[in-house]
Image (tube, grey):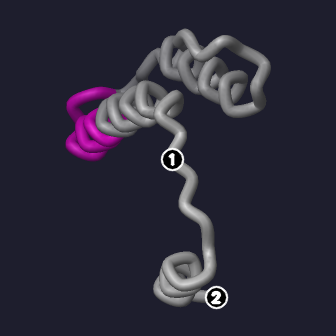
Amino acid sequence: PSMRAFILDMCMNGEIIVNSDLRDLNKELRYQGNNLNQIAKLAHQGRISAVDFSELLTVYRQILLVLRGDSDGSC
């Protein structure tokens, strides 16, 4: 189904669950997404040629642990 169909179905038949514990996680994901977009832009401009992604990968691994329930939520 399309996104529109999914949203309409959820509005009419679905249950919306708000998990405030994930608010900080969503905030961190937005920050990391912005950082990744900035790096991609600089790479396309030729202003950088190599990037150390170790910190980014560490954050993503922590996020995955939280989503799996293997962590207390601290990043």
The residue singled out by tag 2 in the image is 1
Measured as percent of width and height from the top left, residue 15 is found at 61, 66
Observer able to see residue 43: no
Q: Nearer the viewer, residue 2 or 60?
A: 2
* Secondary structure of residue under mark 2: loop
Task: Give the residue type at disc 2.
Answer: Pro
Which residue sits at x=62%, y=73%?
14
Measured as percent of width and height from the top left, residue 37 is found at 32, 41
Task: Using residue 23 as the reference point, say whether residue 45 is left or right of it.
Answer: left
* Secondary structure of residue under mark 1: loop
Measured as percent of width and height from the top left, residue 59 is found at 54, 19
Q: Residue 71 carries which label?
A: none
Which residue sits at x=66%, y=22%?
61
Residue 30 sits above or below residue 1 on the image: above
Task: Using residue 25 as the reference point, say whether residue 60 is left or right of it.
Answer: right
Magenta stretch encompasses residue 43: yes
**The magenta stretch spans which residues?**
36-48
Which residue sits at x=58%, y=21%?
57
Q: Nearer the viewer, residue 6 or 37?
A: 6
Tell me the quarter of the image containing the N terminus: bottom right
Q: Nearer the viewer, residue 63 or 55?
A: 63
Give the class, few, some or many, for how many residues have Cα within 10 Å of label 2's Cα (few <14, many ≥20).
few
Q: Main secondary structure of the magenta part?
A: helix
Q: How many labels does the image show?
A: 2
Residue 65 sits above or below residue 15 on the image: above
Task: Give the residue type at disc 1.
Answer: Val
Magenta stretch encompasses residue 40: yes
The residue singled out by tag 1 in the image is 18
Q: Dividing the picture into quarters, in which one does residue 31 lie?
A: top left
**Do the residues bearing badges 1 and 2 touch, measured as CB atoms within 8 Å?**
no
